[in-house]
Amino acid sequence: MNIILDKLNSKKIMSAKLWIEEGSRNDPKDKKGIHQLLSSTMLRGCGPYNNRQIAEIVESSGANLSCDTFEDGLLISLKCIESDAYKLLPLIGWMITKPVLQTDQLELEKDLTIKAIKRQKESTYQLAFDGWRKMVYGDGPYGHDPLGSIDAINKINKEDILPFADSLIYRKKNLVISGKFPINIENYIENSIAFKGLSKDLKDQNKTSKKYNKIEMINKPKTTIYKRSLNTKQVVLLLGKATIRHDNKSDILLRLLSCYLGYGMSSLLFKVLREKYGVVYEAGVYHPIREYQTPFIMHASTTEEKAILTLQLLQECWGKIINSEISPEELDLVKIKFRGQLAHSLQSIGQRAEHKVHLLGIGLKKDHDKEILLRLQSITSREIKDAANKYLNNPFLSVCSNKHVIQKISKDWRT
């Protein structure tokens, strides 16, 4: 386990973030959601503590302890005051080395997960995104939501989860602690019985990652449009591509494009779709950090009367970034936006710790951001256009609306 200490003057508050490689991308096809159940259930009993005892320890300290499932990994988060570090940090170790996984607590988490999935299905945007993701990634690691599916969740039992729980100790792990923490905290962790075994067998830690290092997650969709008919007057449109890994040298070029398209009131989507034509009430770009093929999606919500025009304008904006270079003035503004966006995402100690542990977790250096900011100065509009041509041609469309709108959009759709 790699430990990074990020000392800051934070009024005796510390934030600890531990990233364990492989999240929902490692769910078996017939057990989608198994990592979500593992991460939530191991918080309900670990080491010598049951669910009630863990809650008492955390709540009596006024602390926060959580475990979240992402596509590329599991994230354990702890926020507490410096003087409670010795009392609370062992809980993180026990969650990995000795999760209890009581059957009654697992059943409770299954019920909560199913309710969360049902709530998601009430969102038109979520339905459109799930359809786009399934169309583009298929049954690949990014083809389903980390929550999983209701059918799969219902079938998962404790015996299914145990092998995944046992594998946690061997998976690559990075722990980042930001804020104000005890001076000897690293030595304490390395010698704590709760973390026993996490600092050795580094060769074994590579076992689960080797097979995924070769994954390109290439899926060949049979169609370029996903259509979901609903009884609604709302229209949600998603236009996008699966692109490149975050460690690719061209990733920063696509991130600048996402700023140009969707960040702030001076962005292209806002100026075209909101100010000039007034066809949408929501528009933006979804371009998260991913270890493998990262989705790059423009999304817009509109009314049925404006659906066709909105789609045409989205296609025009997409075509513009492929066929035209950003002007020098626009490029300067985009670079300023990127720096501001990065700074905004690192304001709190929790944000700093999570961002750093995420980058380390997907195989990047801890000073990755500094290297990117240095490179940012020399990036040209031609480089950005070349990256758009290489990675963003022939996007895929997902649309959720009523049958009448879907029929019209299907006739108008051109890749």
Image: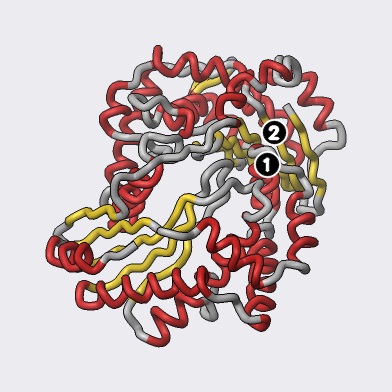
Q: Residue at x 68, y 19 (%)?
A: 194
Q: Secondary structure at mark 1?
A: helix
Answer above or below: position of 200 versus 371.
above
Packing grade of label 1 (10 A; few <14, some 14-19, many >=20) is: many
The CA span between labels 1 and 2 is: 6 Å
Viewer-proximal residue, 288 or 69? Answer: 288
What percent of the width, then of the height, locates residue 150?
A: 28, 33
Tag 1–tag 2 contact (CB < 8 Å): yes
- Residue type beneath disc 1: Val
Task: Name the residue type under label 2.
Answer: Asn
Viewer-proximal residue among 403 and 344: 403
Quadrant that contains the C terminus: bottom left
Is 150 situated above or below 269? Answer: above
Q: Could you tell me which residue is drawn at 66 percent across and 46 percent down?
A: 247
How crowded is the residue under tag 2: few (<14 C-alpha within 10 Å), some, or many (20+)? many
SS for tag 2?
Answer: strand
Q: Name the colour scheme.
A: secondary structure
The image shows residue 226 at horizontal and vertical percentages of: 27, 53
403 vs 122: above or below: below
Question: Where's residue 60, x and y in %?
Answer: 59, 36
Q: Hey, which quadrant is residue 207 in on the image? A: top right
Spot occupied by residue 7 in the image (x, y as percentages of width and height): 82, 47
- Disc sitting over residue 357 in the figure: 1
